Amino acid sequence: MTTALTLLLLGGCGSDEPSAASTSGTPTSAAADPDGLTPEQREVVDAAEAYTDAIVGRGAQPLGPVIKDLVTKEVYDFIVPADTKALEDAGLQYVGQVTIKPSSVTITGDKALVKGCQDSSEAFMVAKGRTAPDAEAKPLPSTRISFGLVRRDGRWIVSDPEAADAKAC
């Protein structure tokens, strides 16, 4: 797991991995969505996006209540203190949005892995209380992501969010 929340949020991109619909541990008879994902792969990507949307889109709200139902206890116990130290204690918050562009989605039983790019070109770190980027806003870099998820109580939650800087998505 990465050691700083900002690394987890900074989108990911660029790889020579197979396309998003190319891998799945479970064959699905339903038609794939317009992005080439099966319905189950779409659920996994949507869960990963809900996690990143909650972090970046929460404004000045504390992180804990926002991600509580989106991550495992282990991720929660790591991310919330890291976020508090990196952002809240510094008087900063995120604004904008990130977009996950999956290059592969692998599902094996109750575990899944989303790899791809998190495009952060529309996300910024700003002074707490700001609702839009200003001249002092710091753009978030895009990142390559590898998000592990597990199925708990019939829904996917993030269990291992990893990200590494990328030049662009």
Image (cartoon, rainbow, N blue to C red):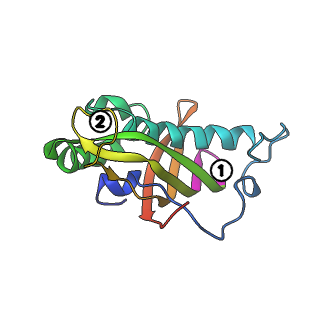
Residue 63's disc is: 2
**As drawn, 163 above or below 123:** below
Task: Looking at the picture, tell me which residue is in the foreground, 97 or 4.
Answer: 97
Q: In the image, residue 77 lies at what x, y percent?
A: 28, 44
Q: Quadrant of the C terminus?
A: bottom right
Occupied quadrant, residue 35: top right
Q: Which residue is mark 1?
A: 107
Q: Amino acid at mark 1?
A: Ile
* Residue 121 highlighted magenta (yes or no): no
Residue stretch rendered in magenta on the structure: 105-115
Tell me which residue sits at (52%, 41%) in the image.
49
- Residue 148: give x, y in percent of width and height: 51, 52
Query: Front-most of 55 and 80?
Result: 55
Please say if 7 is above or below 29: below
Q: Which residue shows up at 55% across the image and 57% down it?
A: 117
Relative side of 80 to 43, left or right: left
Say which element carries label 2: helix
